[in-house]
Amino acid sequence: MAITSFPLLVPLLITAQHLSEMTITGSDTTGYGGYMAALLALDAIIAALCYVLFPYLWRD
Amino acid sequence: MIKHDILSASWWKYLCVVFLTYTVVAGFLMPAPAMEILHETIRNLYFHVCMWFAMMFILTVSLYYSLKYLNKPTEDYDIIASQCAYTGLVFGILGLVTGSLWAKYTWGDWWTNDPKLNGAAIALLSYFAYVVLRNAMDDEQKRARISAVYNIFAYVMMITFIMIYPRLKEVDSLHPGNGGNPGFNQYDLDSHMRMVFYPAVIGWLLLCSWIASINIRTERIKRHLLNQ
């Protein structure tokens, strides 16, 4: 069942991959701030959703 | 067991037939603006864009019923949420197919490595996972609860991937309305096209609801027979 979380994590992975690429190559850093903001926003969304939804999963 | 509600009413299905007949006839016969590269393929606007609108609409309905299910676990909410999600998936696939055809005749390839296209594909992937998740569990209540939670996640990711991510200025995209490109209506949706496009949107939304309503009613009967 945990495998179904993979498609949900792809947005995070892609954003993190773009950021890592910029950090490592250091050549083209335009849009660094945008991706960073997107990453933080995604983190915030996921954390908030987890916080709200986990009790429903746990209730058995 | 047969409920007589809006789902079994017939007036909006006649309306759907009228709108879609008009869309197909007028969509192919009405004048369209002559534009470079696009040419007559601009008529695909009445089909491709409407598929995504229909998908967004039915997935929002699905999300609404998932939320309602978590608030108050009722079997019927689970049925509506799941069948709407399945219908949304079908329309998403149709959206990809019509988009792929359009891409072939304007961008020169069936699939380009475009953030909008990949985003849409990943969004659909998360709904495929929803189907897998539902089929993986036997216990009805557990399945309903977990898939409702998953559905909320999938919806948020779908919105991120289709509506937000491709629209970032940093992203390179060929798709109209994305990566800093102007959207269609800003420069070439003329009054002739509007006369077809708006009825087309309503027609496809109604067709999508119609398919979903048949799925929902079949599933209700199935559950009813199983519980006997």
Image (cartoon, grey):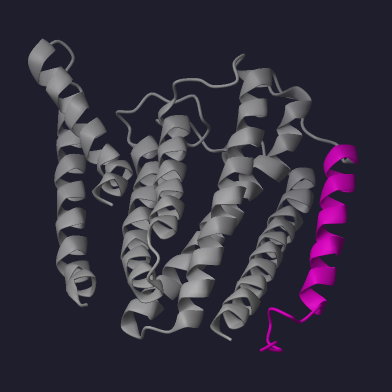
**Image location (x, y in percent) of residue B150:** 33, 60
Residue A26 in view (yes/no): no
Which residue shows up at 33% across the image and 77% down it? Answer: B70
| Foreground of the two, B186 or B177 | B177
Q: Is there any visible trace of residue B146 in the rendered image? A: yes
Quadrant housing the C terminus of chain A: bottom left
For image coordinates 75% across by 23% down, the residue present is B39
| Residue B4 vertical placement versus B18 (above, below) | below
| Point 76% across, 82% down: residue | B9
Q: Is residue A40 above or below residue B54?
A: above
Main SS of the magenta part reads helix
Magenta stretch, residue numbers: B1-29
Report the number of discs: 0
- Residue A17's x, y, as percent? 20, 26
Asked which quadrant contains residue B41, the reply is: top right
Magenta-drawn stretch contains B13: yes
Whether the magenta-drawn stretch holds residue B176 is answered as: no
